[in-house]
Amino acid sequence: MAQRGTLGVAVIGTGKMGADHVRRLAEVTNGARVAAVVDVDAERVKRIADGIEGCTAHTDAAAAMASDGVDAVLIASPGPAHEAALLTAFEHDLPVLCEKPLTPGSASALRVLEAEQKVGHRLVQVGFMRRYDTEYAKLKALLNTGQLGRPLMLHNRHRNVATPPGFTSEMLINDSVVHEMDITRWLLGQEITAVTVLKPTPSDNAPEGLQDPQFVVFETAGGAIVDVEINVNCGFGYQVQAEVVCERGTARIGDGHALITNQAGRWGGTIAQDFVERFEDAYDRQVQAWVDATRRGEVTGPSAWDGYATAAVCEAGVRAQTEGGRIEVELVERPAFYS
Ligand SMILES: NC(=O)c1ccc[n+]([C@@H]2O[C@H](COP(=O)([O-])OP(=O)(O)OC[C@H]3O[C@@H](n4cnc5c(N)ncnc54)[C@H](O)[C@@H]3O)[C@@H](O)[C@H]2O)c1
Ligand SMILES: O[C@H]1[C@H](O)[C@@H](O)[C@H](O)[C@@H](O)[C@H]1O
């Protein structure tokens, strides 16, 4: 299909991620412009719109989506606001890049799947940006060659410097480990079938009441075992590492993401301090891929099904965290629409 003209994007939610996506669309991405911004914080959204030529400010997502010049939507509001924004985008037949989670909870995610199928064609890409990270992409390409044999185990480490105020134990699963859920399903090409959560004595760095770190184990449909160290008040840096153990070898990413210096008899490097820094390139590539596909009239990348499947694994994970033991993941049959 022929390329459409410059894509006019409405960005919904202009907090940490939304403001960064506005900057990206305005300054980094080719073929797109920020046509509208939306936030419940009227002052904030006006300030952001004022800095971009031809951009309108709204406090209501539906008004923004109905406005002239909006061809597509980027949702970066908090998870509980995603379902309403997605359903409104579907009413206008607008393609959407929706930050993770698609929605919090499998019931709401299923409603989104049903609504998208009613439209009759895919509209949603979910913002699982790690799939666009160069290191993860290399790992996936290597696994796809089959030269290492069948993956047996996948070890993951996911460390953040510190949690923002209000971060709960459930959020370690829903906001943080959700990335490993997606990356596991994508790298191994298998659904996750069960989750177990082990809880060491919390770190003294963790705020009172936060169960941090946790050790999360997934079982997959193909019989692989996956572990995730989630450790979100580690204090020293933002680290994401993964090692796949296969029948004929192993492959590991996440160590080399640093500037290494030799100076005064010592060698060493720096560690990124947050996801915006560590995954900057991945966010750039994700948004560019979405804009390019949308201008071609296509929808690519993680689908609403991926959003639903991870929501179902999150539910099993939160149950495993609170009830203990091994919790099986309950998934509906995958509709042919998402095959
Ligand atoms: N992919 C990633 O690595 C990554 C990283 C961080 C956050 N996220 C996701 O991005 C989304 C936003 O997270 P954040 O850290 O930017 O949050 P944030 O709290 O910094 O920003 C959210 C913004 O949305 C606004 N808002 C709230 N309700 C709204 C509504 N109904 N309509 C429009 N705006 C509304 C708030 O006023 C705020 O400005 C979440 O879904 C989060 O899970 C993804
Ligand atoms: O919402 C954020 C984000 O998704 C990051 O990528 C992750 O590392 C954090 O743990 C999480 O809180």
Image: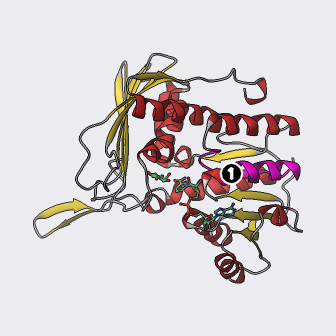
The residue type indicated by label 1 comes to His
Q: Which residues are magenta?
A: 81-103
Task: Residue 168: say if magenta.
Answer: no
In the foreground, 306 or 202 = 202
105, above or below 222, in the image? below
- Distance from mark 1 CB to nearest ligand 1 atom below 8 Å: yes
Q: Position of residue 93 (x, y in %)?
A: 87, 49
- Picture mark count: 1
233, above or below 28, in the image? above
Side of 82 where 200 appears, left or right: left
Which residue matches tag 1? 82
Q: Quadrant of the C terminus?
A: top right
- Residue in view at x 84 percent, y 55 percent: 3
Side of 28 where 337 appears, left or right: right
SS at mark 1?
A: helix
In the foreground, 316 or 11 = 316
Residue farthest left in this picture:
265
Side of 12 where 260 appears, left or right: left
Asked whether the viewer can see residue 121, the reply is yes
